[in-house]
Image: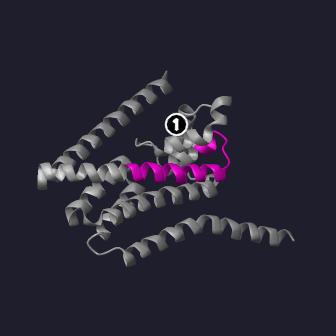
């Protein structure tokens, strides 16, 4: 009986670990099979960049939308916005699901565990426990997820939701709603603003985007260094 329970527990853990990964792999294959060849590199780059890069949807969605606009103009607006939005939402909800099911395992991995601890500290600072905020935690987390600033993606939002004591289903639903609302809004604004930028700057629009991205990288490095020095100073004090 004990061995059966242990085997069942192991199988359940393997399912919880591998299911989000396999679904993500299937989604990538589906994109490759369905999305037209000229568009797939843009959507694939968006998916990969949103998952591994420090940039959030506030940078990557406008870049992807403008790339599609320069590729074939505004003739496929609905498809472009659907693909960009669904890709970002998919990354958010799959990362959230993986964390909800496997956060306890990830905490035991040395570097990842320390990173999660820092994110948990960030979450407590963002949404401190109080009766009023616990009562409105779902609305607060959904709004936080939808806002276009760094650290508002599915990974951080999920950890924030768990830190403040929300149920897993409510955390995942908040990530769904917030990601759809935020990503769709950014995609729509980017589509109309992108047409104006292309009309004004033409092919030079990519130089403008490059300058903005480099400025963003520089700002990110500077802010990270300042935070590191401040943390180190507080630790040595």
Give 165 or 232, whichever is nearer the viewer: 165
Check disc 1 and report the residue beneath it: 122
Residue at the right extreme, as displayed:
1
Question: Which element is circle 1 on?
Answer: helix
Residue range in magenta is: 161-185
Residue at the top extreme, as displayed:
237
Q: How is the image coloured?
A: one colour
Query: In the picture provided, is 110 more to the left or to the right than 31?
Result: right
Could you tell me which residue is drawn at 46 percent across and 57 percent down?
A: 89
In percent of width and height, residue 51 lies at 42, 57
In percent of width and height, residue 46 lies at 35, 60
Asked which quadrant contains residue 36, the reply is bottom left
Could you tell me which residue is drawn at 60 percent across and 31 percent down?
A: 128
In percent of width and height, residue 68 lies at 26, 62
Up the image or down, 185 lies above or below 46; here it is above
The answer to whether residue 176 of the structure is visible from this angle is yes
The answer to whether residue 204 of the structure is visible from this angle is no
Give 45 or 137, whichever is nearer the viewer: 137
Give 189 or 232, whichever is nearer the viewer: 189
Q: Quadrant of the N terminus?
A: bottom right
Query: In the picture provided, is 202 more to the left or to the right than 59?
Result: left
| 177 drawn magenta | yes
Could you tell me which residue is drawn at 38 percent across and 78 percent down?
A: 33
The chief SS type of the magenta part is helix
Up the image or down, 184 lies above or below 10; here it is above
| 55 drawn magenta | no
Q: Residues within 10 Å of mark 1 (few under 14, many from 20)?
A: some
């Amino acid at each position: 009986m004990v061995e059966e329970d242990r085997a069942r527990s192991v199988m359940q853990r393997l399912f919880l670990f591998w299911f989000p990964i396999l679904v993500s792999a299937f989604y990538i294959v589906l994109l490759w099979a369905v999305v037209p060849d000229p568009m797939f590199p843009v959507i694939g780059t968006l998916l990969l960049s949103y998952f591994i890069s420090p940039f959030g949807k506030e940078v990557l969605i406008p870049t992807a939308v403008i790339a599609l606009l320069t590729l074939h103009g505004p003739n496929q607006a609905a498809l472009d916005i659907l693909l960009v939005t669904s890709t970002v939402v998919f990354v958010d909800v799959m990362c959230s699901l993986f964390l909800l099911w496997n956060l306890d395992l990830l905490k035991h991995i040395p570097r990842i565990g320390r990173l999660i601890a820092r994110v948990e500290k960030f979450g407590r600072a963002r949404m401190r426990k109080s009766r009023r905020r616990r009562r409105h935690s779902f609305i607060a987390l959904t709004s936080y997820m939808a806002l276009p600033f760094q650290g508002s993606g599915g990974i951080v939002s999920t950890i924030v939701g768990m830190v403040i004591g929300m149920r897993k289903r409510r955390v995942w639903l908040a990530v769904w709603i917030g990601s759809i609302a935020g990503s769709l809004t950014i995609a729509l604004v980017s589509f109309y603003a992108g047409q104006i930028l292309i009309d004004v700057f033409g092919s030079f629009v990519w130089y403008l985007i490059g300058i903005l991205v480099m400025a963003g990288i520089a700002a990110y490095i500077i802010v990270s260094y300042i935070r590191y020095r401040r943390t180190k100073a507080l630790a040595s004090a």
